Image: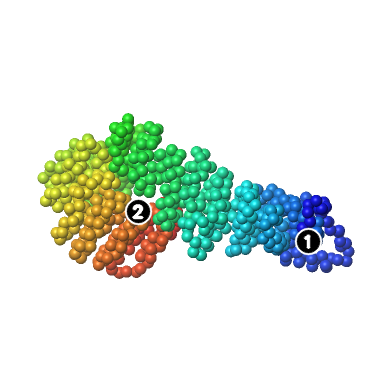
Amino acid sequence: MSPKSNEKPVEIAAETESKKANDGKTNANDKKKSKKNDNPDIVEDDNAMSEEDRELKERLETCVSTLINEKSEASVTTQIRLKALDVIVSELRSATSSMTSVPKPLKFLRPKYETLKEYYGTIGDSTEEEVVFLRARLGDVLAVLAMTLGKHDERESLNFKLKGAKDYKSIAKTSEDNLGSWGHEFIRSLAGEIGQEYNARVLAGSDPDDDAAFADLFGMVDVIVPFNVEHNAEAEAIDLLIEVQRLKNVLKLDSIDEKNFRRVCLYLIKTADFMSDPDDYAEVLETAYELFHKQSQYFDALRVALRMGNEEAIPDLMSECSDPLMKKQMCFLLARHRINYEVEGDDDEEELNEIIGNEKLSEEFLKVAQDLDVTEAKTPEDIYKSHLAETGGFSRRREAGGAVVDSARANLASTYVNAFVNAGFGQDKLMTPDNEWLYKNKDHGMMAASASLGLIQLWNVEEGLAQIDKFLYSSEEYVKAGAALAVGILSSGVRNDADPTLALLDEHINGDSHIMKCAACTGLGIAYAGSAREDVMELLLPLVEQENSGAETMLEVSLAGLALGMIYVGKCDDAVGGTIVQRLMEASDEELDHSHSIFLCLGLGLLFLGRMEKAEAMLEALRTIEHKISKTAVIVLETCAYAGSGNVLQVQEMLHQCAEHLEEDAQHQMAAVIGISLITMGEEVGSEMAL
């Protein structure tokens, strides 16, 4: 190559084609047109282009001709090639910075793609700085052209960019600024190929945890991710980091601030629903938690922590939060989740603990009811409206003489309707005025009637206990049992310093009455649901472990197991889980044939509610049980573990269970049907599968 001092200036001129005469050449032109239509490299007829487009096309073709030195002129130096390449780069960048359609420069350079690739290959491995810079710049151009022309499987766009980045590095010039300058479409295309290349290398044997094996890819990721975040493409940035399994890198970005962190966190939380791998699921939520924490959004951080089951984070979040209103909001969230946590060392300690304990829940509920003017007690007849129907609906039957005949079933239905329609209002027209309705029922009907007081007086512990207490000393066992159950319902989710529920029901757990034991177990489960109280667990575990055979004993065991599942819901407690599984494994076939044994399975399922893969060990233990209940127990546990997750694989497994046509031992199919609805609950794609 001649020295620069001997170089002669060369003008880059556009050669225009002379017009050809049309006379006598119609057939030839028709053939030429059809040939153009068949050739994908021919963009459009020159005559159909505007003057501006024609000039652009000619300028680009001249630049390509100069770059590859088509005429082999000795005067075309590397410097001149760089100038020609600069023109191409300038035109491409200006056209691709905001693409709404295929840019003209890309159309006009399409026929030259293979020619430029061939020239790129002829540059060789020269180490001369100008030549290396030319090769790097040409690599950039080819990477952009390969976005639409390259072979998808070969990832040509990425390969050209990686080679270009290596060349820039060798001559100590940065290529960071020229990634974003090619526009969002190029960045999006490159990000897709980076994900494919990463997966290809992992399949080829590279260690995903070894950054050195992917250093060239991560160099680009570190440029693309901040670019996307800065240009409101946070979702694409997160997708790329998830694709290359480096999601935690998002925490290092300075571009995530108070203006965009909510969009990032919202996308992360929504993305978690589609993570089939438990580790990926945990990592996505953990990242969202740390971003919220970093931005001092303690309420949102607490919300994510509770979803992860990370209750250990509660003390740190509460102590770091200095905003009293946000702290109260956090306490309301803990109260809603029935988290048994006590605030200590805070100026507003008493008030915050009242909120967490739901002590004023009844008071606030009644205030809202008064504002809405719905405090007036309703009767079952207000719901049935049987006077509008000729058949009388649920109304009591009449004898020929017109006298009303009490129906035990109709009265029981009225008890339930009355309790639910007046729940929490503290008054009704059947139970609270007098005890007449109570004695219009028998056995379990009396039990339901007295228990309904707990629902009517819901959350109002002080006044409600005063009305229920008298029934605890009734001579009727079923009335006493209903009152015990009412105490549990009344105290559901409400924390009281006196702890009356445990004080009143403790003696009945260890008593001799079977019906009182069952009611007390159920009452404790409802009252302390989600609280993980160890003193209550120690009270109930002996009931689960009792070895006496018989239907009554199995009912007590099952209800105690269900109560423990409610109290430790989602806690994955080893002591409770191990005790329930051990009892199922040691139970005789006669005991497992009892209809109430399913409650024991449900108690175990509640223990792992929403905890997905953490239930695997228990699932394996349940599969060893040599009884038909084994299948039901496994499905119930899987249903609870994946409830609300939308896990497609679990839905498919449940559908497979339902597809079998069984005439006997098909109890597990009922559980599978319910399982489908619970797993897909709130998730659109899964809900469609369930249909």
Q: Quadrant of residue 312?
A: top left
Closest to the observer: 196 or 416? 196
Quadrant location, the C terminus: bottom left
Measuring from the top left, give residue 642's x and y in whole percent: 37, 56
Name the kind of residue labelled 2 in the image. Arg
Closest to the observer: 384 or 292? 292
Closest to the observer: 555 or 172? 172
Q: Quadrant of residue 658?
A: bottom left
- Along the horizontal axis of the image, is 286 left or right of 425? right
Which residue is located at x 43 percent, y 54 percent?
Answer: 280
Which residue is located at x 21 percent, y 39 percent?
Answer: 499
Where 277 falls versus 661 (above or below)?
Answer: above
Residue 611: assigned label: 2
Q: Quadrant of residue 470?
A: top left
C-alpha distance separating marks 1 and 2: 67 Å
Name the kind of residue labelled 1 in the image. Glu
Where 371 falls versus 241 (above or below)?
Answer: above
Q: Earlier in the sequence, mark 1 or mark 2?
A: 1
Which residue is located at x 34 percent, y 61 percent?
Answer: 672
Q: Is residue 11 visible?
A: no
Count the marks. Answer: 2
Measuring from the top left, give residue 319's x and y in whole percent: 36, 36
Check disc 1 and report the residue beneath it. 70
Measuring from the top left, give residue 286's x and y in whole percent: 42, 48
